Image: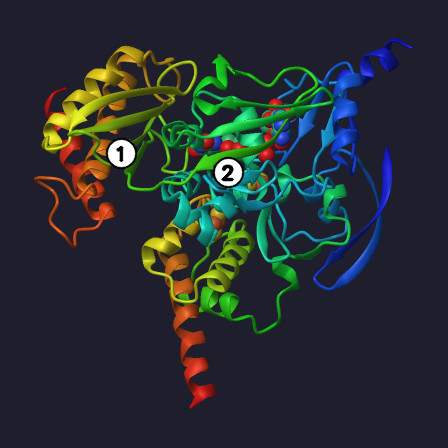
């Protein structure tokens, strides 16, 4: 009897609904239900014995959650679209190249083939890479429950350590990403273990086209605080890259508050965070076609890796 | 709950009863398919790789019920004269061989998507596969050699 009562938490019951209404009804009525997207995070939690759920609601049989739609403003990406598809789909690469680039940096191709866009966000980990891009792009999350649909900007989605804006009874149904027009961008992911490990520090930078002599420099930071962080700062459009880096680092500095762990102490991560910020800004600023680095024909990737090498050198010297 | 599913592995159909939380890795091994191996158990090493409709999957993180009827390929189901395998042998790309089925399948996936990968692209695709014997250089060379071989065969055929 006791064993039976304890059973639900040991092995959660799997539900495999085939309509969205049914998903919402299950999430609304079950006591401790959890959505099962790609399962790459859930399965690890189960193996570690730290999954506290009575029921799992599998989304894989629900139609219409795995589409990528072109909208007036950009893309609407279904929650069950795989990370690998975000990386490789020609439409995503054309409309939101920064998102495609960053999704391609998550884990390894097998995890990316299985993990879903919705599950990645809802996982809520402070080290996730994709939110860095989604925040600077101004994306918003579509949430649904039996009560209806609401939208939350990705910038407001991460509310606390491992905690998101997803309310009980809700699921992520899509992410809307505005088209990346007229802006240039860069991404840097620095790992202290293997290259495909979770980042020790990551940063996405996006520079808008000039308005009245100013560009907006937006930064998304991963692994550098208890939630993914967003900051932005205006930079004169004729500024050189060194000024853009300085302004960006000044804006990012105050929100960097790293959690020490096996990937590095707080101090190490703070310094590495500023290196990631610099690398991302150099890659983004280099492709604005602005002053200094506007020389045509140099690719962002090349500039990014040059910048990374140089800033690493500087960083080691300053130790 | 237990569900009757059809596991389609290397073209052969198996009816099996799987529990909701059975991992694809365990179900395949119960079927005697031992080229699918457990290493890390958390998606990071690639020893448990299978191709599901030509997409690589870590079977250690995949529930079997989701693969009902999905065509699966495992390394032991490849043709006797599989080109990737032959190039692995020619390059001496193995010592103990534990990791090799995973690398071979990742190689197949990569070459299907990108027939002429650079060394960098090969390394990027294999970044989540670990070889404890450290035969990475030979593995990358074997995949490069397969790409060259396929290209030469295509040229011969179109000539
Ligand atoms: C080896 C390895 C390396 C990794 N490295 C990185 C890395 O470098 N960078 C990085 O960003 N990530 C990394 N990850 C994490 C990976 O990104 C996540 O595991 C994955 O994105 C989760 O997606 P999923 O669909 O598998 O989620 P699931 O495992 O299905 O779910 C994760 C969480 O989200 C909830 N959920 C799922 N779908 C929804 C939905 N539609 N609505 C509401 N809630 C939902 C679940 O209930 C659960 O709480 C790594 C993972 C592995 C296994
Ligand atoms: S055992 Fe599955 S990836 Fe290592
Ligand atoms: S050959 Fe031994 S682990 Fe790769």
Residue A173, placed above or below residue B87: above
**In the image, what residue occupies the spot 87% across and 15% down?**
A4
At 16% from the left and 44% from the top, the residue drawn is: A289
Q: What residue would you read off at disc 2?
A: B44
Relative to A76, B67 lies left or right: right
> In the figure, A119 relative to A126: above or below?
below
Neighbour tally class for label 2: few under 14, some 14-19, many 20 plus, Cα within 10 Å:
many
Q: Mark 2 lies on which chain?
A: B
Which of pointers 1 and 2 indicates the residue nearer the eye?
A: 1
How far is mark 1 from mark 2, CA to CA? 37 Å
Quarter of the rendering containing residue A132: top left
Identify the residue position indicated by label 1 in the image. A208
Circle 1 SS class: loop
In the rendered structure, find residue A274 and report the number of the disc placed on it: none
Looking at the image, which residue sits at the far bottom? B159
Residue at figure coordinates x 44%, y 32% from the top left: A130
The reply, left or right, for residue A304 in relation to residue A8 is left
Residue at the image position 40 percent from the left and 38 percent from the top: A196
The answer to whether the residue bearing label 2 lies less than 8 angstroms from the nearest atom of ligand 1 is yes
């Amino acid at each position: 009897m006791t064993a039976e009562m304890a059973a639900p938490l040991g092995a959660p019951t799997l539900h495999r609904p085939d309509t969205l209404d049914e998903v919402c009804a299950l999430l609304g009525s079950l006591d401790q239900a959890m959505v099962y997207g790609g399962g790459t995070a859930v399965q690890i939690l189960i193996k570690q014995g730290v999954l506290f759920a009575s029921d799992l609601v599998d989304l894989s049989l629900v139609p219409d959650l795995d589409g990528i739609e072109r909208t007036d403003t950009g893309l609407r990406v279904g929650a069950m679209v795989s990370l690998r598809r975000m990386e490789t789909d020609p439409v995503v690469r054309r409309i939101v190249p920064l998102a495609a680039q960053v999704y391609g940096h998550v884990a390894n191709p097998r995890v990316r083939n299985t993990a879903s866009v919705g599950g990645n966000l809802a996982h809520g980990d402070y080290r996730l890479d994709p939110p860095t891009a989604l925040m600077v792009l101004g994306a918003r999350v579509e949430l649904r429950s039996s009560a209806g649909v609401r939208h939350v900007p990705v910038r407001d989605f991460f509310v606390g350590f491992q905690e998101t804006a997803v309310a009980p009874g809700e699921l992520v149904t899509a992410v809307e990403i505005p088209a990346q027009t007229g802006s240039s961008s860069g991404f840097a992911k620095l790992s202290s273990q293997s290259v495909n490990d979770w980042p020790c520090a990551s940063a996405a930078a996006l520079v808008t086209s000039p308005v009245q002599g100013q560009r907006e420099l937006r930064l998304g930071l991963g692994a550098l605080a208890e939630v993914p962080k967003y900051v932005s700062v205006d930079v004169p459009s004729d500024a050189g890259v060194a000024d853009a880096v300085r302004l960006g680092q000044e804006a990012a500095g105050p929100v960097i508050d790293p959690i020490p762990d096996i990937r590095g102490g707080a101090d190490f991560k703070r310094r590495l965070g500023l290196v990631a910020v610099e690398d991302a800004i150099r890659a983004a600023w280099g492709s604005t076609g602005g002053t200094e680095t506007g020389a045509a024909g140099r690719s962002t990737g090349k500039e990014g890796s040059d910048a990374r090498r140089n800033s690493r050198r500087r960083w080691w010297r300053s130790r | 709950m237990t569900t009757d599913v059809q596991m389609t592995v290397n073209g052969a159909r198996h009816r099996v009863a799987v529990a909701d939380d059975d991992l694809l890795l365990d179900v395949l091994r119960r079927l005697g398919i031992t080229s699918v191996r457990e290493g890390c158990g958390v998606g990071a090493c690639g020893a448990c790789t299978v191709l599901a409709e030509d997409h690589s999957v870590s079977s250690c993180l995949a529930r079997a019920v989701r693969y009902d009827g999905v065509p699966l390929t495992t390394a032991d189901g490849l043709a006797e004269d599989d080109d990737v395998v032959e190039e692995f042998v020619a390059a001496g790309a193995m010592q103990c061989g534990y990791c090799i089925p995973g690398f071979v399948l990742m190689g197949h996936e990569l070459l299907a998507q990108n027939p002429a990968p650079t060394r960098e692209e090969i390394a990027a695709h294999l970044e989540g596969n670990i070889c404890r014997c450290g035969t990475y250089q030979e593995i990358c060379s074997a995949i490069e050699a397969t790409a060259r071989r396929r290209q030469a065969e295509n040229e011969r055929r179109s000539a």
